[in-house]
Image (cartoon, helix red, strand yellow):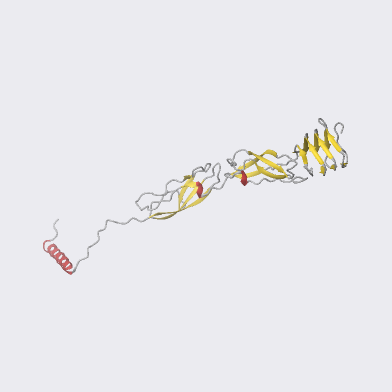
Amino acid sequence: MYGDVTPTADFTIPGGSTLTIGSGQTLTIDDGITLTNNGTIANSGTFTNSGTIANSGTFTNSGTINCSTGNISGTLGGNLANYTGATFPTNLTATFGQTLSEISPTGNGTSGAAQGDFTWATPSDYVGNAGQPQHNMNLTLTHANAANYRVVTDNVSVTVNKAAPADTDLSFTIPTGHVYNGAAQGIGSVTPAAGITGLGVITVLYNGSPTPPVSAGTYTVTADIASGSNYTAATLPLGSYTIASATSSSVTSIPTLNPAGLAFLALLLGGLSFWQRRFGTQE
């Protein structure tokens, strides 16, 4: 081949023939043009393809091949081709607390051949905090014809949304054995669990009231959580809390008397009554 060449029609390299693209030369195959190789292509220059390469012969590459459509059939020897037509996904979203492995990239496939498979470079990484500028994550594309193409890597933007809180995101204990004592009682404080960040203000409610209870009874306990930087607002049930009734110890029981004791008590009360009638009550 002499100089730079851009064919304007389909063409074929017959068996036994060789097309050599020397260093410093460029062969460009435009969209809609098909190069059929039944012989040999030896590239040490630049091969730019946006058309179709139907390769059933020998294709060796010690130079550079840039393909925007990814249509190279057969086997490419030497340097792999660069896939310049990769379309990476946009408008990806995640929820706070997820890892990249939980996000399925979209945007697979172009108007030409299927691109291949997207994978995250660091799938175990967390997506980061919500409510911040988009996070740039490293995504790789392994071409459907991986034997002929290099892996393509790019940064994609992921918008992280707030997560809905759960009771497992909270640290609390509902005590037992509380007995009425005339003072306000309750379950104590409810705080974010270890490692949980971005929860809003937490208010403990007893039957819907933020006031800790005084009276004996059983109360439904909920946590009212305001919207925070990483979590949405929510009201979560925590369980039941009970204050037992106090047992009175101020009343002394009357002992059981036998017949003799009852007779003595009657005699004593009768004597007391006679005394009051006879002498009156002295002040």
Q: Residue furthest top?
A: 24
Is residue 237 toward the left or the right of residue 94 in the image?
Answer: left
Pick the quarter of the image with the N terminus: top right
Is residue 17 toward the left or the right of residue 162 in the image?
Answer: right
Quadrant housing residue 55? top right
In depth, the one of 19 and 262 nearer the eye is 19
Q: Position of residue 198 (x, y in %)?
A: 53, 42
Residue 50 shows up from this direction: no
Q: Residue furthest front?
A: 16
Q: Position of residue 254 (x, y in %)?
A: 23, 62
Is residue 7 toward the left or the right of residue 213 in the image?
Answer: right
Quadrant housing residue 37? top right
Q: Position of residue 126 (x, y in %)?
A: 58, 42
Q: Residue furthest bottom?
A: 259
Q: Residue at x 16, y 68 (%)?
A: 260
Residue 66 shows up from this direction: yes
In depth, the one of 198 and 15 nearer the eye is 15
Total marks shown come to 0
Pick the quarter of the image with the C terminus: bottom left
Q: Residue furthest left?
A: 279
Q: Position of residue 13 (x, y in %)?
A: 87, 41
